[in-house]
Image: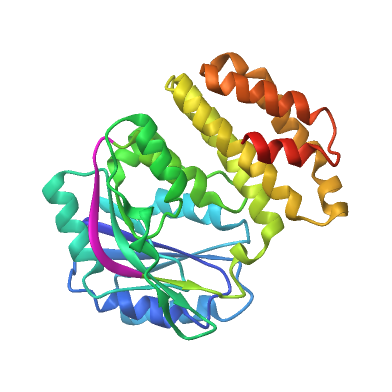
Amino acid sequence: MTPEISVLIPVYNAEKYLLQCLRSLQEQTFSDFEIICVDDGSIDDSYTIIQKAALKDSRIRLLEQTNQGVAAARNRLLSEAAGKYVTFVDADDWVAPDYLAELYYRAEQEKADLTRCFFFQYDQTKQCCVRLACSSKLYAPVAEGSLSQLRTGLYDSVVWGKLYRRAWLRAQDIHFLNGYVAEDAGFSVLAFFLAGKISTLKKQLYFYRKGNPQTITQNSEKMYVGMLKNHLFVWDEIQRRGRLHSSVACELQRRLIGDICRFRKLPTEKIREYEELVMQTVQFLRARRNLLCLRGRFRNYCVLGLAGKHINKWFFFWMKVFR
C-alpha cells in the first residue's frame, strides 16, 4: 500500500548519528510511513548501518549513488517518494516521537501544502539544547500574499521540520539546484512563495544538531557561493513562472546584494577568486533594473553605479551601505 508519508534522508558520512536518527523515526506514534535513505557516496559505515536497519524494518529503503552532493540526493529522494506527504530529515538530526503524527494531522485538518513545526537547536560541542531557536521571529505568522510568503521563505530557509504535500510539489515543479550547497535556500523560498496554504504548528518536534564538523554548513566559502547561486536560481524560477512582480524583484535584489556582501569576509586572495561570479551577479541586476520598483531602481543606481566594474576597497562599502 502507498504510505501517507515518505521520510527522506540524504546521507553522507553520518555513521556517528544515523542510528539515533533512524531510531527516532522508528519510534514514531504515527505508523503509516516509509523511510528512504540515499547514501551519497559515503566513505564511512553509513551504508552498512542503514542496510542492517533495513533488514530489520521493511519501512526503510536504501538507495546508493556516487557522490553528487546533497541537492542531487534530495532530488532523487523526491523522485522515489510515494507518500501523500514528504518530509526531509537530516542524517545527523532526530525528531520527537509525535513529529509525524502532529504534522500529518495538522496538514490534513488545514489542507496545507506546507506545514512546519518549531525545533530545538542542539549544540554538539556542549551536548545540550543551548537555546530555543524558534523563540524569535523565525516562526512569526505568515501573512497572505506572495511578497510576505517570499520573505518568510528567505528567513526560514531550511527544508527539515516541514511536511510538504507531494502532489503539490510535483505540480509546481519545486526542486533543488544541483551542484551547490545551501540548496535549502532555493527550495524553501520557492515552496513558501508558491504555497496556497501554509500552516505553522507551534510545537518543538525537530532536533537540529549544530556544530557537527562533518556538515557542509561549516564551510563558509561554499555557503557564500551556494546562497548566491540559489537566490539567482529563485529569481529565474519565479520569472519563468510569470510571477516576478516589481515588489518581489526588489526583495530578491536586496537578498542578492546581501549575498555579495558576504564575500567581503573571505581572505583577499579568495575574494579575487570569486570576482568573476560577483561581477556576473552585478551585471545580472543591472540588466533587470526595469523589473524593479522605484525604490529598487534607486538602490540599483546607487549600489551598482558606485560599486564600479571591479572589486576594490569601495566595492563592498557601497554594497553594505545601500543593501
Image quadrant for the N terminus? bottom left
Image spot of residue 213 (x, y percent): 62, 75
Q: Is residue 54 visible?
A: no
Left or right: residue 164 compared with residue 215: left
Asked if the magenta segment contains residue 212, the reply would be no
Against 262, residue 15 (above or below) is: below
Query: What residue is shown at x 36% (from left), y 41% (from top)?
Result: 192
Which residue is at the far top? 290
- Report the number of discs: 0
Image spot of residue 209 (x, y percent): 47, 73
Left or right: residue 92 compared with residue 67: left
Q: Foreground residue, 104 or 50?
A: 104
Q: Foreground residue, 170 or 276?
A: 276
Against 28, residue 126 (above or below) is: below
Image quadrant for the C terminus? top right
Q: Is residue 316 visible?
A: yes
Display colour scheme: rainbow
Of helix, strand and loop, which mostly describes the magenta segment?
A: strand
Which residue is at the far left? 109
Against 189, residue 183 (above or below) is: below
Query: What residue is shown at x 62% (from left), y 56% (from top)?
Result: 68
Image spot of residue 309 (x, y percent): 83, 28
For residue 230, what is the image quadrant?
top right
For residue 32, what is the image quadrant?
bottom left
Which residue is at the far front? 321
Image spot of residue 262 (x, y percent): 68, 49
The magenta region covers 196-206
Query: What residue is shown at x 19% (from left), y 63% (from top)?
Result: 102
